[in-house]
Every structure is written in structure tokens, then in C-alpha cells.
Amino acid sequence: MSKKRTQSADREQFLAELCAETHSLEQLALQQTDQVVLLHTETDDGRECAEAVRDLIREEFSVDVWLREVEGLQVRDAARFRRVGLHKLFQILRDECVEWQQQRPEERKAILNATGGFKAVVPYLTLFGVIHRVDVVYIFEQSSTLIRLPPLPIHFDYERLGLARSALQLLRKEGVLPREKFFEQIRGLPYEERPWYECLLEEEEQSGLVTLSGFGFLVVEAWEKDTKQLYLSPEAREVYSATQGEARKRLDGFLSRLQDPLYRAARKHSFSRTDLHVYKLPHQAERAAGFVRGNRLYIALLYTSHDHYERDFPNHCVAEFEGKLREFSPWTPPAEEYIPPTEIPDEWEELMAQNAELRKRVAVLEELVHEYEQQEQASVSKIQNLEHQISELTGQVDQWRQRAESLETTNRNLQQEVENLQHALAQAKRPWWRKLLGLPAC
């Protein structure tokens, strides 16, 4: 911090060498109308460094700078960092980014600069940016290139998240819960699907209880802070009232989910020729166009025909409806159970019936596979028995062969003895005169 500008005539190099904050802010090309909020730890060192950086930024960039201390953000107590520090960090980010930007969305854009400070919080800043559609920037120490991490095209399974809403809100209220009690709050949850929800939880090392993870806290906070009351303009109300049957049920489900901030963020799109936000129902023609003001979502236009939407929507803008917000009326979800959107009136029931039939077929096939496995095991057992019998028979044949060879040798010996005896007998039967003369028998 003791460097002086006279050490370098080049301002950009001077700011790059000064500190990470001035380096990245120089790359962002700050204007005097911009505002900077510096977040610092709850330590004395963190506060003093933040004050010094604040003075440098005011001097070098001539912009307004504020300091925000993040309670619990420190390195001495890991449990306090997770349970207090991260939650306070997210609350401040919401205040300074989301809510600040919502006050004048056409004029304000928040950017999270993750260059300075704790590297451990960078993943959480990125996660916050993903969920709330806030750009995150970062610059490496030896680099002059600013890396932008724009809101990623990541989508969550909002239907699954919605099932855990009461469980997450209970965990937020209680602070910690036994793992089983948390999962008991998700009705009808199969045991094999529990791992999908583990990213929402974090286990306490000493107690074994679970608390909200950083992601879980962001989800719950979004529900608590950003769930909007939905209002329809007279034009949108007219289109809504004209629908009936499956089209009405599909539209009711769509509007109900648009009150959910996470679902709304995933379905929001911008159109190049208008400042109205348009929300799409996947694989359907329905479109809803509107804007957020405070805790209300104003639906200015509803479309049930895609062709009409493409022709008409670019001709409207927010200013057309802002002057007549009093004409908008609140919309309340119907009491009956929501039926998921379908492309054909009976497609959902048909798919459910097909699913049930497939389950039966799978059960039959599993039974056949089980029978084949049993038959295979029986066949393997028989083959093993035959192999054992063949081995025993082979041993017996070897023994018989050895005996046969032994008998053959004995026979040869006996035959030789017989021949010797026959020769001796022939010699003994010679006449006396042949014996006297030493002549052989005839």
C-alpha cells in the first residue's frame, strides 16, 4: 500500500501493482457514476485494509465507496464461517446486488468482483451469481485480462426443489435438525432419491446434525425474499378468462410457478425489441410477458398462440403499462390440484398408464431373468458334477491301464518260464544214447 504514483508513469501499471482491487477496477473501466461496495471480514485487519483500499479507490477513481463488514467471515472458527459468515455474506450480496438492482432495473447493473479477499468465498460468489443472474469477474495476479463469469445456463429441477420447500424452511427456522427429520418433511420421497437433496445440507462435525449448506441457504432465501404476488393486466386477464379445460389447467400451473423466484429465473428471456421480460412454458405455446416491481410480478400480456406472440410482443414495452398499474388485479392459484402441462389433452394420463404398464413388464422381465439365473446356476452345478465324475472315471481308467500293463508283463514272464520248462522237458526225454553222445532231442 506504500507505493506512490511517481514510481510509475503509467497509470494502468501503477494501479495493477497497487493492489488486486485497483487492478480489477481499472480493467472494469469505472465511471464516476459507478458505486463500489467493499466487503471485509469481521477482524481488525480486514477493516483496516478495507479502509485503506476505500481511500485509494476514492482518490484514483473518484467514485462513491462504502464498506460492509461480513459478520462471521474469518478463519479461526470454521463452523462459524459456515453457519454465520456465509449466510451474512449472502444477505449482503442480496442487499447490494439483487435488491439494489430491482429498484431501477433499466438503469442499474450489479457486478461481483471476486478478485480481492478470501479465495474460499469465490465459489460462493459464483454460486450466488448463477442463481441470481449476476455477472462475476476475476483477474489473476500476474494477468492483465479480466475474466468474466457470466450467469451460467444452468437449470435446476425446480419441481424436485419445490418438494423440499417445507423441509428447507423448517431447517432454516430450527438451525439444525437430525437428518432423518429433514427427509421426513419431504412427503413420499423414495430413499434412493435422498442423495439428490444432499447438496442442500451440511453435517455438523460434532453433533452429526445437519444444517443448510451454502446452496440450500441461497434457495431458501430466494423463496423467502423473491416469491412474488402475481398481478394480471386487463389484457392478460381477458386472455386468461378465455381459456378452459386442459389449457386453463396448464396456464394455472405456469402462473403458479412464476411466483417462485428460481423457476422464474430459469424461464425468463429477453427480447431484443422490448424491455418486457417474457417467460416461456416449455414445449408449449403459452407465453407470459411482464416485469417485477417490489414484491409484485406484473403480467402485462398473456399469449396462448405462438404465432400471435411473435407478431404482437415486439410492439409493447414496460412504459406502456407502468402508468396503469392500478388496473392490474391480483391472481390467486385455483384450489384444485395442479395437473402438469401436456401437449395433447390426455397425454399425461396416457403416459402414466404407459409407465404403469412398463413397470409391470419390467417386473415380468425381472422374474424371467431370475428364473434364467436359477437355471444357469443349476446347469453350472450339473456341469461341475459331470466334470467331477469324468475326473473320477479318468482316474479309474488310469488305474486299469496300469493294472493291464502289469498283467502284460507278468504274462510275458510266465510265457518265458513255460518255454524254458518245455525245453528242459524235451532235453529230459532224449534217448540214453543221445544223452551219452550229447545230441539234442529230435
Image (cartoon, grey):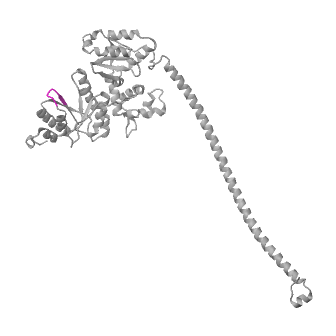
Is residue 337 positioned above or below 55 on the image? above
Residue 275 or 131: which is nearer the viewer? Answer: 275
User: Toward the viewer: 312 or 30?
Assistant: 312
Residue sitting farthest toward the front: 442
Q: Is residue 417 left or right of residue 364?
A: right
Q: Residue at x 37, y 10 (%)?
A: 239
Based on the displayed image, in which of its 4 quarters is residue 254 positioned? top left
| Main SS class of the magenta portion in the image | loop
Q: Position of residue 62 (x, y in %)?
A: 12, 30
Instruction: Check the image and name the residue furthest to the bottom.
Output: 436
Say which residue appears at 10% left-offset and 42% top-offset.
8
Q: Quadrant of the N terminus?
A: top left
Looking at the image, residue 93 lies above or below residue 276: below
Give the side of residue 410 with respect to residue 438, left or right: left
Highlighted magenta segment, given as a residue range? 30-36
Instruction: Based on the picture, tell me whether residue 35 belongs to the magenta stretch.
Output: yes
